[in-house]
Image: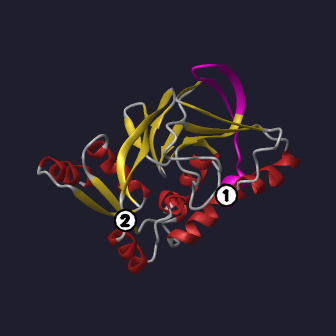
Amino acid sequence: QIAELTQKAVEAGAQTILLVGGDGTLREALGSLVYQPVDVFLFPFGTGNDFARFAGIHTDPVLAAEQFLSSSPRPVDAAKANDQYFINVAGMGFDVQVLEKTKGFKRYFGDKWAYRLGLISALVHLRHCAIEVKTETMSKRKNSIILCAGNGAYIGGGIFGLPRANFQDGRLDICIVQELKPWRIPKVLGRFLKGRHLSLPEVEYFDTNRITITTKTPMAVELDGEILTQTPVEIQIQPQAVRLLL
């Protein structure tokens, strides 16, 4: 419905579109917004609000409204995974496990507690997978527990997974956390949650224009907090694709 309403507004000649929701709301609207002469502002009323956090958009409604009134358009990057647009982060492995566990807990708890319990449960049942990664300059095979690719720095409601991300540099930031020995899991994931993981030997961090990820069997890939595609997946940057009001 959001995609349809956004498309109708763009076709009607709207110059500014206000979205009320979270990362998923913005992602749903993206297909009608990329490379269009339309300014976009997001009022962050989602669960995680990871992109809003990174972009510096206030979650307080009054402060967000004041920010909108004083904002100006800035061209920011988007990205595409297979045929799906997203603007924040694509991920597989640990963050997908968190989403899957959280979905189950939401039947019994509110969003915040469901996220917390989902995070704990994913840590307890941590799984690794064999992946093959290809970019313009390299090809590697790894046993990984986390792979993130994106423009934004935060995933899963505040996990600081891509601390060097910049949504105006025309590049995807990539973070791969390799399979961990059991006694390394608390330290590595503890530092991953806080964005202090880049110097760890199990972590590989780089940027690229395009990345292709394949696995022996299809694995779920989340885009901006929703599981929407699976491997094999090609993720590519869409430079300066959206005019965001900030």
Task: Please identify the quarter of the rendering in which residue 84 is found.
Answer: top left
- Residue at figure coordinates x 42%, y 42% from the top left: 78
Specify few, some or many for label 2: CA neighbours under 10 Å numbering under 14, 14-19, or 20 or more. few
Report the side of 6 relative to 78 (left or right): left
Three-letter amino acid code of the residue under disc 1? Ser
Relative image position of residue 38 (x, y in whole percent): 25, 51
| Quarter the N terminus occupies | bottom left
Marks 2 and 1, Cα distance to the nearest angstrom?
Answer: 40 Å
Whole-percent x, y for residue 174 in the image: 62, 37
Name the residue at 36% across, 60% down. 72
Q: Is residue 141 magenta?
A: yes
**Residue range highlighted in magenta:** 120-143
Q: Which residue is mark 1?
A: 121
According to the image, label 2 marks what residue? 71
Rendered location of residue 134, percent (x, y)? 60, 22
Task: Tell whether position 196 is magenta.
Answer: no
Of discs 2 and 1, which sits in the foreground?
Answer: 2
Return the disc, 2 or 1, that comes first in the chain's sequence.
2
Secondary structure category for the residue under label 1: helix
